[in-house]
Image: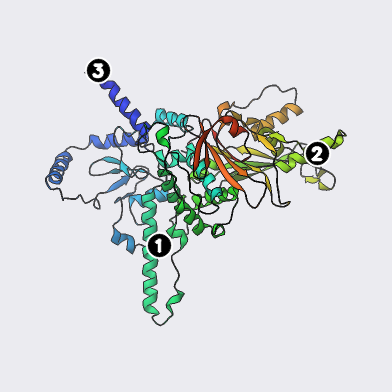
């Protein structure tokens, strides 16, 4: 074996591990440096480890007691066992820290620790020790990961059984499961540990049962029919259910051919029952709105997976004054953006801003219709509704300024008088997953708007519709003499988005109809999911569809630090 072959093998092995997802992306260079410093002081401990290993090999029934192993957090001075025993879990009060490293990792988001006896790194998120081939942290790994996050994983093409007007849920689930950001969150980063979540919920269930037994022994004469079941928030986790559903779509081998990816349909009963427990308004077989379900599912996913869910009170991380979320759940890491509401004086230009978070952008077709009808009346033409518009036109209408004049004038502090103001709503911070809701269903007039919306499949440039692009355009109009900007130029690829999924509504009724979805696979092919029916369709069919929800992903997505 030559020297070049020896050097190539570790890199090839890291590449295979990286493609398969069997790597730890949470370890940093500082953690590896700390481990090397501690390993330098380890001398006589190796003999004891070898003796313990020989004892374990000779006795097949021998077990290693991990409860006495002490783990030290590399982010702070915490020291403790990895996990408490079942007896300790039953004795700990609700919302109380059990003193283990796993609880410390959940509460403080400190993922990396070192076993003091063996000087081995342990990742709480991956629930495994960090081996040399799996430690791929550092700048090179992070840059490679960012570039690969926008590519979907290879998944089985499974249809979903309609369990009684559940097509609205099936279409949303297919769009979410094939989203590369959620695939990275559950498959690669493993940010939601289902094992820890189940253990914590089991501990809370045991506490509830113990409390009920104590109350029952005190009140023997009280009627037993007054007992209630456990709290649904404890028994159900939408994060665990979504992770289990997405795991059913993972192929047994990454080298399957495209024909072998076709699989039998499944019934997403677990997510349906979890939604019923979390949101009773969805109980029953009635048809619901796919957009309403998406917002509820994202809200429930955050409520069940944010890092402080098991702390006493379960308070969710707050937003900053500029609308940015402090939560690192999948929803706020990839779906949450910031809107900027601006109110500017038309006389002096003084502007006030307010920032609010958003999970999707609702684009109205009624505003476009009213705008076209007014222009046709001014031109003296007959009022005939245009049947086609573009997503860029709807975005311009969304960000258009509203003039407040006459009786709607606003008092300006700088002018010390009531002045005409201009009000606008702009996209200030864009998320990794940008969801557009085309408001086709007019529930007030009980009619569906059948106008065709043209949208690009790739290369949607969002910069002209953000606060940065709008401010630049406004400056060019008002200050033609200034041709250059003094600010720091940003990355143009930050605003480029590609379409990954489309949810369609079929039918003309706002209270019924049928939902289907198009998703883009890892080979850039478009797949139609219509309940149990699954087939490959051309891109022209996707572009001509009656889009109701559009899922765009950033071409160069960000990863939360």
Marks 1 & 3, CB-CB < 8 Å contact: no
The answer to which of marks 1 and 3 sits earlier in the sequence is 3
The answer to which of marks 1 and 2 sits earlier in the sequence is 1
Tell me the crowding category of disc 2: few under 14, some 14 to 19, or many 20 or more residues within 10 angstroms, Cα based: some
Residue 547, position as x, y percentages in the image: 62, 39
Q: Nearer the viewer, mark 1 or mark 2?
A: 2
Residue 316, compared with residue 553, is above or below; it is below
| Residue 346 visible somewhere in the drawing | no
Q: Dividing the image into 4 quarters, which one contains the N terminus?
A: top left
Tell me the crowding category of disc 3: few under 14, some 14 to 19, or many 20 or more residues within 10 angstroms, Cα based: few
Q: Secondary structure at mark 2?
A: helix
Q: Which residue is mark 1?
A: 94
Residue at 39 percent of width and 62 percent of height: 205
Q: Secondary structure at mark 3?
A: helix
Marks 1 & 2, CB-CB < 8 Å contact: no
- Rendered image: mark on residue 39: none
Residue 273, position as x, y percentages in the image: 47, 56
The answer to which of marks 2 and 3 sits earlier in the sequence is 3
Residue 344, compared with residue 232, is above or below; it is above
Residue at 73 percent of width and 26 percent of height: 476
How far separated are the C-alphas under marks 2 and 3? 75 Å
- Rendered image: mark on residue 373: 2
Residue 461, position as x, y percentages in the image: 61, 29
Q: Nearer the viewer, mark 1 or mark 3?
A: 3
Q: Nearer the viewer, residue 247 or 474?
A: 247
Q: Quadrant of residue 84?
A: bottom left
How far separated are the C-alphas under marks 1 and 3? 58 Å
> Which residue occupies the extreme bottom position in the image?
221
- Rendered image: mark on residue 3: 3
> Which residue occupies the extreme left position in the image?
58
């Amino acid at each position: 074996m030559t020297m070049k072959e020896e050097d190539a093998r570790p890199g090839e092995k890291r590449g295979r591990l990286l493609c398969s997802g069997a790597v730890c992306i949470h370890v940093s260079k500082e953690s590896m440096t700390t481990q090397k410093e501690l390993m330098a002081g380890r001398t006589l401990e190796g003999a004891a480890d070898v003796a313990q290993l020989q004892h374990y090999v000779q006795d097949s029934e021998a077990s290693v007691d991990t409860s006495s192993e002490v783990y030290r957090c590399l982010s702070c001075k915490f020291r403790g066992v990895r996990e408490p025993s079942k007896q300790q879990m039953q004795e700990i009060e609700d919302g109380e820290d059990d003193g283990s490293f796993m609880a410390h990792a959940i509460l403080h988001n400190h993922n990396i620790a070192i076993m003091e006896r063996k000087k081995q790194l342990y990742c709480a998120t991956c629930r495994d020790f960090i081996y040399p081939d799996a430690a791929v942290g550092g700048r090179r790994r992070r840059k490679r990961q960012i570039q690969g996050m926008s590519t979907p994983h290879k998944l089985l093409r499974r249809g979903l059984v309609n369990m009684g007007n559940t097509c609205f849920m099936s279409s949303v689930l297919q769009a979410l499961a094939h989203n590369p950001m959620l695939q990275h969150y559950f498959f690669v980063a493993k940010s939601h540990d289902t094992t820890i979540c189940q253990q914590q919920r089991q501990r809370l269930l045991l506490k509830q049962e113990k409390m009920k037994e104590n109350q029952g022994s005190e009140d023997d004469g009280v009627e037993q029919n007054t007992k209630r079941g456990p709290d649904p928030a404890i028994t159900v986790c939408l994060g665990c259910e979504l992770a289990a559903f997405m795991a059913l779509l993972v192929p047994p081998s990454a080298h399957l051919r495209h024909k072998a990816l076709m699989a039998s349909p499944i019934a997403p009963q677990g997510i349906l029952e979890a939604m019923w427990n979390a949101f009773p308004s969805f109980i029953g077989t009635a048809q619901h709105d796919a957009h309403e379900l998406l917002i509820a599912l994202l809200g429930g996913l955050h409520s069940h997976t944010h890092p402080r869910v098991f702390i006493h009170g379960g308070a969710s991380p707050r937003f900053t004054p500029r609308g940015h979320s402090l939560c690192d759940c999948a929803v706020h890491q990839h779906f949450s953006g910031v809107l900027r509401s601006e109110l500017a004086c038309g006389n002096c230009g003084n502007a006030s801003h307010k920032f609010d978070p958003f999970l999707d952008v609702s684009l109205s077709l009624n505003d476009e219709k009213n705008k076209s009808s007014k222009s046709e009346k001014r031109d003296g033409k007959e009022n005939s509704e245009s049947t086609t518009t573009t997503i860029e036109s709807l975005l311009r209408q969304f960000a258009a300024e509203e003039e407040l004049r006459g009786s709607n004038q606003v008092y300006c502090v700088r002018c010390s008088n009531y002045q005409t103001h201009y009000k606008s709503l702009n996209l200030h911070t864009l998320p990794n997953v940008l969801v557009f809701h085309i408001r086709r269903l007019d529930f007030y007039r009980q009619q569906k708007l059948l106008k065709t919306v043209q949208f690009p499949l790739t290369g949607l440039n969002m910069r002209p519709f953000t606060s940065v692009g709008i401010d630049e355009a406004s400056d060019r109009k008002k200050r033609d003499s200034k041709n250059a900007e003094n600010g720091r130029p940003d990355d143009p690829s930050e605003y480029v988005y590609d379409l990954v999924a489309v949810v369609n509504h079929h039918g003309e009724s706002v209270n019924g109809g049928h939902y289907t979805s198009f998703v883009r696979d890892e080979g850039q092919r478009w797949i139609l999911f219509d309940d149990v029916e699954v087939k490959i369709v051309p891109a022209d069919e996707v572009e001509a569809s009656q889009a109701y929800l559009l899922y765009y992903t950033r071409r160069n997505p960000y990863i939360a630090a």
